[in-house]
Each structure stands twice: as structure tokens, then as C-alpha cells.
Image: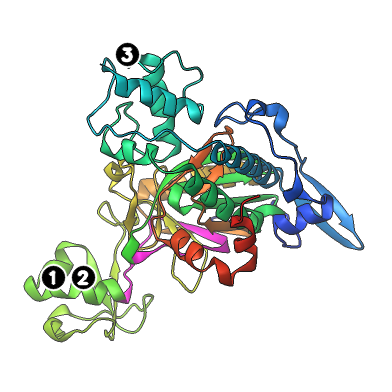
Amino acid sequence: MKGSFSNQAFTKAKRFTLKTALFISMSGLCSAPTLAANELESVVLANSSLTTYNSQKYMQADDSYYFDQYSAQLIERTEKAINWYQEIVNNGGFTHLYNDELLELGSNSKEVSLLAQRLYQERDLKSNACDETICMFDKDIEQAVKQFQSRHGLKVDGRVGKRTFATLNIPAKEKLDKLKLNFYRITNFAGASDEQYVYVNIPEYSLRFVKTGDVKLKNNVIVGKPSWETPAFSDEIEKFVVNPEWRIPTSIATKEIAPKVAEDPDYLVKNNIEIRKNSYLDSQTVNPSHIDWDSIKPYQFDHFLVKRAGEENPLGEVKYLFPNAEAIYVHDTPAKQRFSQSNRALSHGCIRIEEPFSLAREIIKHEGETQTLSHIDSARDQNSTQTFHLDEPLPIHLVYWTAWVDENKLVNFRDDIYQRDKKALLNNNKQSVIAALLKNK
């Protein structure tokens, strides 16, 4: 049927965490021997040091268990990183940088020598030719700075300003604690039992589509600002809508739009917004002039605001729906310029995706429903709203990982944008598992 998928391409498995899976398949994961520094290629972990868990099904009694290779390798790499950063801490930590002047290509000073030493300690700089005397900021150091900035979510320009200096001066012990805390989160990743799934790492501002252990798609996203946090939870994408209407939440309608209508009675018309009487789907509308906009209080509104599909619709051309109590979904946005920002905690909680139809194409490609692409193109050309239902829902996981080792074996750290790490660390005495992980080995 047009607008629907018929192939049952998504295999559902009994859900349990990777922590459970690895416990079944091996014992003593956390008791693995500590790696010496020479067993690692810096922040790029050596291939030879990894244990690969092939995607496969394990049978126990009459139940079928699926272990995702991507998830298994993620936890293995993160554990290796914990061992390595523990060794850095044991050896005295990182060199502290006191300079606060801009360092860039061509800079020539003792501060550059200290910078090179610091970059070498995490092996962003592969070899350090600088001694304790004056050193030149060359192309190798610039490339090392860019890698450091990239894996810390900073603006990648190869220049060491105040923000990069501050990040370079984060103590090794603080990074170690962050890795341990996120190791706990990663071992409890719900996607470990899914053959294919979408996951969004909120602090990374990134979405991935994973199928049988391989990353098929990676896309930049925008997430909720600190005052409108994007929650971490798991659900299933059931459908996507081309040229969607925007059903404006009551919070935004009353706190942001109502004051604008009170000031400008033509605001709704100018912005292609209509008032629907009893529900978002109600065909009966209400005349804006019949409402006393000055008297509306937050969250108190008897009707429903809907912004029609169009170029200025904040949902853009497509939205992906996984119905949930938080009213969170993934959608396009007309404000493409915001994806160039390093800090992309900018939305009201929903997830904006940079290449909006890339996910739809991956879903369609793996379902084998190539004719659906023409239906999507037709809906876009005609500017008509059309819903495409997935025959079998696709799992989606919103996670909050501020430290991990990526598929390129780079150790990544991100800002704790919602202060969830801070809260977890403050409360770790009440959470025995986290407390145990944060203890020094």
C-alpha cells in the first residue's frame, strides 16, 4: 500500500543489556589485565588489543539472544581506555599549561614545547620532537590540535585559544572518572540486543543507524537546550511524515506565541498558524479575534495551535515519530546554519537532523522497498503531507554518553551539557555500581 512498508525487515529479539550479554558470554570482564601504554596507539586504540565479539545468536534454553557487535566492541574499547587513563593517573597525570595567549601555526615559544608535550601524553601528537626549550608550532602540532579538538567536541580550527587551553587542562583523574561513569551507562545500553537500530548520543550531537554491527549512517543533530533537556530513553520509530504540520506544544503556545499574538493580532496569519478547536486533528477552527490573548497563562489554553506545512515550518520536510510521553521526535529544520556550531544544545527538546531524508533512505534501502523513494519524492514535489508507516518498528535509543571510544578507536569526551554526570558523581555513594566503578583499581 502506498505510504506503507510491507517487508518485515526488523527482527525483534528478547531485550537485555550488553552487560547481561557479556556476563553470559564471558566472565571477569572488569578484571581484564591493565594495559601498558605501549599496548595502545594513543587515543587510537591498537587493533591488536581489541577482542571482537561477532554479531551472532546465542541460545540459552528456548530463547534466542542477539549480541550486537558494535555494542560489544564499544564496551571493549571503553574498558581499554579506562585502563590506559588509569595508568596516566598513576604516572602523575597531564602536564599543566599556564599560557593563555593564542597559539597557532607559526608560533615559536617555550609554551609551544609544553603544548607538544601535553598533546603527546594522549598521543594526539604521534611523536614529540620538542624539548624543554623553544619550539615551533608546525603542521604536525596543528594536526594534533585539530584531532584533540574534534574528539572533545570543540571548534576544529587547529588554534589553541582559551577554550582549548581549558580543555587541555582537565585533569587526567577527572577524565578517568568520566570514562568509568560512562562505562556503566554503555554496559546498560538497550540497543545491544537489536539487529538494527538508531541511536542518538545527546552530548555528541550525533545520530547513527546501526545494522548488524555496522554503522550505516552518521548524522549531525541538534538537541534540547539545558532549559529544555532531551531525555534519555528507548522507543521504536513507527512512521515518518513528509511535509508535516507542526502541532505546537501547549508550553510554547502559551509562553511564547500567545504574547506575540497579543502584541500583533495578525501574527498567526503571517506565520501560517491556525487554531483548532478541540484537538490537533479537529477540522473546526477558531477565529483568533475571539480569544483574549493577554489573559492566557502558561499551560492554560483551551485550543490547539498548528503550523501548516511549508518552507517556514520548524519541522522542515520530514519528521520521524516514536510516540512517547515526552513528545520527543526527530525532524528536519529550515535553520541549517546552526549545524555549523560546536554547541548544538539549541532546541525545545526534540532532535533536529542535518540531512533529514538520509535516515528514510537507509530504512527504505534495508527494507528493499525502493519504490517508496518515488512516493516520497512525489510528496515533496507536490508539497503534500503524507505518512509512511514502518511495517515493523525500528528501535531508537536516546543515550547520554559524555565519554566513549568511537568506531575509529578515538577516545572521545564531551561537555556534561545537562549536568547529569555531576549529579551522578555527587550521588554515587547511593548507587553501588557507579560507586564501585569510580574506585581506583
Asked if labels 2 and 1 touch by Cβ distance under 8 angstroms, the answer is yes
User: Which of these two is toward me, 2 or 313?
Assistant: 313
Mark 3 neighbour class, 10 Å CA radius: few under 14, some 14 to 19, many 20 or more: some
Work out how far the residue at label 1 is from the one at label 2, CA to CA, in angstroms.
Answer: 7 Å
Q: Which mark is residue 136?
A: 3
Residue 260 is tagged as 1
Dot 2 lies on which element? Answer: helix
Mark 3 vs mark 1: give the one in front.
3
The type of residue carrying mark 1 is: Lys
With 158 as the anchor, is 423 left or right in this view? right
First of labels 2, 3 by sequence position: 3
In front of the other: label 2 or label 3? 3
Residue closest to the far right: 61
Q: In the picture shown, does residue 97 fall above or below 381?
A: above
Q: Residue at (74%, 40%) from the top-left corner?
A: 33
Query: Residue 256 has which mark?
Result: 2
Q: Is residue 4 visible?
A: no
Check disc 3 and report its element: helix, strand or loop.
strand
Check whether the beta carbons of the residues at disc 3 and disc 1 lie within 8 A of each other: no
Q: Which residues are magenta?
A: 228-250
Q: Does the magenta portion include 132? A: no
Place of residue 171 in the rendered image (x, y in percent of width and height, measured from the top left) = 44, 43
**Given contact means CB atoms under 8 Å apart, are the residues at marks 2 and 3 in contact?**
no
Residue 329 image point, x, y percent: 45, 61
Identify the residue at horizontal 51%, vertical 70% (top origin).
Answer: 324
